[in-house]
Image: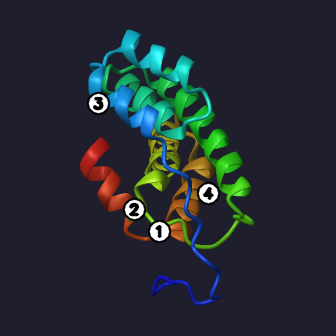
């Protein structure tokens, strides 16, 4: 239980994705390679997060938004399959959770870039409710 988990809700821990990690470690972070990884692993929030982050770096904000949105939804599906009920900790320290948490943050950043303020606030709250330390860690990676 994390220190900000006052309700005592158990942490949600997603399953590892060794094939996704292996593919990401062997292919360059460029559009074509990331498209191949996402096509091979369409359920992986981590794959979608990498595509969203690269699109944003390449100043393709709408594509980043779309990729992060898909990763967000895939992540919610995975969290629910793992027992998450829409609340409770999703710890950043558990590496398999990092893809979905990055998608929350990346979608928030892309929403901010297109002026979707309600979405920015909602996603900021979701990320903070999941793990208060995650945003700072993600900022270090994707900021």
Instruction: Look at 71% across and 47% down and name the residue there.
Output: 77
Q: Nearer the viewer, residue 71 or 139?
A: 71
Q: Which-is-in-front pick, marks 4 and 3? A: 3
25 sits left or right of 95 in the view: left
Image point (47%, 68%), residue name: 131
User: Residue 94 is drawn in which quadrant?
Assistant: bottom left
Label 1 or label 3, whichever comes before in sequence order: 3
Q: Are marks 1 and 3 in contact (CB under 8 Å)?
A: no
In the rendered image, is residue 136 in sight? yes
Q: Along the polypeptide, which appears first: circle 4 or circle 3?
A: 3
Q: Count the marks: how many?
A: 4
Tag 2 and tag 1, C-beta contact below 8 Å: yes
As helix, strand or loop, the secondary structure at mark 2 comes to helix
What whole-number distance in Å separates the C-alpha atoms at marks 1 and 3?
Answer: 26 Å
Q: Residue at x 29, y 30 (%)?
A: 25
User: Which residue in the protein does label 3 denote?
Assistant: 25
Q: Which residue is mark 4?
A: 122
Question: Label 4: how many residues lie within 10 Å, few (<14), some (14-19) or many (20+)?
Answer: few
State the residue position of label 2.
134
Which numbered disc, 2 or 3, marks the residue that appears first in the sequence?
A: 3
Q: In the rendering, at what x and y percent does residue 107 appear?
A: 52, 41
Q: Earlier in the sequence, mark 2 or mark 4?
A: 4
């Amino acid at each position: 239980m994390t220190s900000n988990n006052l309700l005592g809700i158990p942490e949600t821990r997603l399953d590892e994705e060794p094939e996704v990690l292996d593919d990401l470690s062997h292919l360059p972070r460029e559009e074509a390679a990331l498209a191949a990884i996402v096509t091979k692993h369409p359920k992986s929030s981590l794959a979608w997060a990498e595509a969203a982050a690269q699109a944003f770096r390449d100043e393709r904000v709408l594509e980043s938004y779309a990729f992060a949105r898909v990763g967000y939804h895939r992540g919610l599906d995975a969290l629910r399959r793992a027992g998450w009920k829409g609340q409770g900790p999703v710890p950043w320290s558990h590496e398999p959770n990092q893809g979905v948490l990055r998608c929350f943050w990346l979608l928030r950043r892309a929403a901010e870039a297109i002026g979707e303020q309600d979405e920015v606030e909602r996603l900021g709250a979701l990320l903070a409710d999941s793990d208060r330390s995650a945003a700072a860690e993600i900022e270090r990676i994707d900021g």
